[in-house]
Image (cartoon, grey):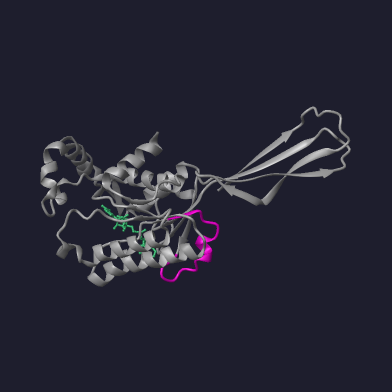
């Protein structure tokens, strides 16, 4: 969504025989560290019957973010948060537009397509960031494919199209022993992570949440995961000083890693695309902190 500001200033100029005309030059873009693109006035001289007119046209464009899996549980929270921040959002998923009505849904450009076969021209041209929520569980092969290969394909497409930022929603390792981390889910995630960090060494972001709670929509119904997740998060945070000594035990984080709300994951992703200094791997705690920054 591009917003255009138009300033028409008529200052009282000192006596002069020429008029300075400040006009939009669409190609003169710059990007500041918050990702706002501006094209601004170019000075040209012209003979004008009204020597005291200065037109200033400023074109301020917001971020244009592509959310892979924007109609999923985490993806829809990201789309909603991005829309609320005035960010232009494009979602890519096989099923495309969600069926439930909501005002933010109307403001997202829904592209129906499979990440393995999509024509990237339809989604990535002009994008300033990609956020991938691609992932899931299933057979070993399916998990390797959707958590790993699908994201590798997406990272490389984003890189080819010159998209400057890539954010991956990955997963906490729960302190699991290595034989459990060798499942297709975790090997896929780690493969995707290393692709992000190698192709985007100075801007790539990997968020590693544990259990994510919120309202998950399944077949038209809302499952209120927050009824369990929210109190559990509070209890685990309140007791973390006592439970810390246990955290060195293998798999202890299955019980001790605090859940995080889907809105916090979404806000951390929004923070990632608006802060150039935010890159690398982020833990559950750091996701929470990043979300707080955006809330302020
Ligand atoms: N939920 C949690 O508690 C949790 C915890 C930690 C990490 N995570 C990670 O967070 C990410 C998001 O999880 P989630 O719970 O939001 O998953 P989800 O609801 O299943 O969303 C996955 C999204 O990916 C899309 N998708 C799947 N295959 C695709 C393909 N080939 N091409 C294009 N789009 C495709 C799905 O839409 P279509 O089916 O319409 O294509 C959907 O929009 C995952 O990577 C997951 O591993 C989740």
The correct choice, above or below, for 87 with respect to 242 in the image is below
The residue at the point 50 percent across, 65 percent down is 160
Which quarter is ligand 1 in? bottom left
Q: Main secondary structure of the magenta part?
A: loop
Q: Nearer the viewer, residue 45 or 213?
A: 45
Is residue 102 visible in the rendered image? The answer is no
| Magenta residues (range) | 113-130
Looking at the picture, tell me which residue is in the foreground, 100 or 181.
Answer: 181
Which corner quadrant holds the C terminus?
Answer: top left
Q: Residue at x 33, y 46 (%)?
A: 265
Left or right for 116, reference 219: right
Please state which of residues 119 and 198 is positioned toward the viewer in this rendering: 198
Q: Which of the 4 image quadrants contains residue 191?
A: bottom left
Q: Percent from the top left, x then y, of residue 241? A: 15, 37
Looking at the image, residue 232 sits to the left or right of residue 285; the answer is left
Q: Is residue 31 left or right of residue 19?
A: left
Regarding residue 19, the answer to whether it shows in the image is yes
Where in the figure is residue 238, as x and y percent of width and height? 17, 35
Where 74 falls versus 85 (above or below)? below
Query: Residue 128 appears at what percent x and percent y?
Result: 50, 53
Q: Please state which of residues 198 and 186 is positioned toward the viewer in this rendering.
A: 198
Total number of numbered labels? 0
How far across and down, in percent of the image, does residue 8 sit? 73, 35
State yes or no: residue 128 in magenta. Answer: yes
Q: What is the quadrant of residue 140 in the picture? A: bottom left
173 is within the stretch colored magenta: no
């Amino acid at each position: 969504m591009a917003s255009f500001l138009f300033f028409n200033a008529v200052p009282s100029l000192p006596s002069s025989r020429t008029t300075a005309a400040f006009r939009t030059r669409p190609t003169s873009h710059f990007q500041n560290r918050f990702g706002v693109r501006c094209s601004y006035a170019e000075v040209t001289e012209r003979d004008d019957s009204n020597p005291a007119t200065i037109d200033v046209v400023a074109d301020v464009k917001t971020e244009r973010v592509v959310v892979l899996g924007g109609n999923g549980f985490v993806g829809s929270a990201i789309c909603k948060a991005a829309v609320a921040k005035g960010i232009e959002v494009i979602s890519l998923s096989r099923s495309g537009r969600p069926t439930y009505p909501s005002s933010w849904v109307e403001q997202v450009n829904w592209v129906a397509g499979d990440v393995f076969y999509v024509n990237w021209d339809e989604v990535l041209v002009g994008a300033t960031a990609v956020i991938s929520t691609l992932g899931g569980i299933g057979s070993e092969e399916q998990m390797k494919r959707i958590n790993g290969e699908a994201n590798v394909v997406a990272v490389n497409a984003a890189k080819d199209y010159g998209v400057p930022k890539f954010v991956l929603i990955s997963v906490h390792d729960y302190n699991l022993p290595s034989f459990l981390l060798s499942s297709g889910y975790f090997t896929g995630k780690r493969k995707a992570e290393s692709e992000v960090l190698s192709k985007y060494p100075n801007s790539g972001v990997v968020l590693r949440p544990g259990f994510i709670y919120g309202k998950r929509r399944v077949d038209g119904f809302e499952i209120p995961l927050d009824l369990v997740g929210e109190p559990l998060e509070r209890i685990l945070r309140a007791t973390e000083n006592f439970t810390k000594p246990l955290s060195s035990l293998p798999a202890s984080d299955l019980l001790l890693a605090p859940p995080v709300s889907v809105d916090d994951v979404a806000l951390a992703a929004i923070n990632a695309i608006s802060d150039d200094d935010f890159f690398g791997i982020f833990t559950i705690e750091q996701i929470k902190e990043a979300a707080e920054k955006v809330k302020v």
